[in-house]
Amino acid sequence: MIARPPLVVPLLALLALAALTTGLVVDPALVARLDAPVTDGLRAYAADRPTLVAVLRTATDLAATLSFLAVGAAATILFALRRDRPRAWFCATVTVAAPVSWQLGQWLLHRPRPADGFVTIAANGFPSGHTTNAAAAAFAVVLLVWPRVRRTGRLLVVVLAGAGALFIAATRLVLLAHWPVDVIGGVLVAVTVVALAARLWSSRAGGPAAAGPVPGKVSSRDGSCEVRSS
């Protein structure tokens, strides 16, 4: 069973992503001026902390595309072996659609990364691929676990998953691998992709008819139901 987000969730994320993209196309200089104060502050902060930069260079690869694909493939295979087809297809869809989406965005939109960052990457910067991967994995975990745990467990899963995604986003900013808008764009891509995938495959997870016989009713030989008084 997969939690089914309201349709407004992917729609709002998609609208916000469209607004950011439009801003980058129409007036990239304005967006760069908005990004610059945060990036300049992080540059000054990280320049005096080489040990932190070294640690973050390693930690940020937790959300590298290869890691994301490996974990997604493992989850897909696990659910497939358990014959849980909706969740297997959900994991497969997210595993493919998330990296394809951010790579398509970087291919279509020329957005240079911050100059003289602490990592060297040749590709365009919008949206952030690492952030998309991390946020997609976090959101997918929440939707998979949500129907199976109680309120306290749900809160714990949301906090842990959200903290992991925020950590990866922070590494991309501190390492000057991306501008803040790139990271926001990555989150929006992830929310859009995962929410749409959840809505698609949750509808195939079976309905109330699979829950068993209705109390007070028995099936006749011709397949119809009749009410038996108690």
Image: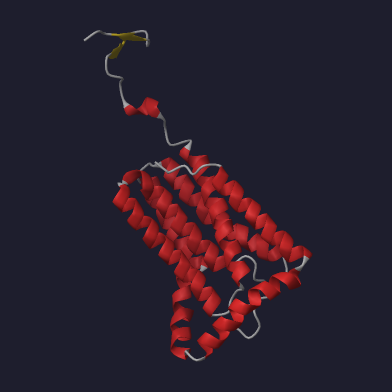
The answer to whether residue 120 shows anywhere in this view is: no
Q: Position of residue 223 (x, y in %)?
A: 37, 11
> Which quarter of the image is occupied by the N terminus?
top left
> Which quarter of the image is occupied by the C terminus?
top left
Q: Position of residue 186 (x, y in %)?
A: 58, 63
Colouring of the image: secondary structure
Residue at figure coordinates x 43%, y 45% from the top left: 87
Q: Quadrant of residue 191?
A: bottom right
Residue at figure coordinates x 57%, y 60% from the top left: 99
Q: Position of residue 193 (x, y in %)?
A: 56, 52
Q: In the drawing, does residue 65 fall left or right of residue 105?
A: left
Q: In the drawing, does residue 160 fall left or right of residue 178?
A: left
Q: Position of residue 84 (x, y in %)?
A: 39, 42
Q: Is residue 150 above or below residue 53?
A: above
Q: In the drawing, does residue 204 fall left or right of residue 228?
A: right
Q: Quadrant of residue 55?
A: bottom left
Q: Is residue 76 above or below residue 21?
A: above
Q: In the drawing, does residue 176 fall left or right of residue 214?
A: right
Residue found farthest to the right: 26
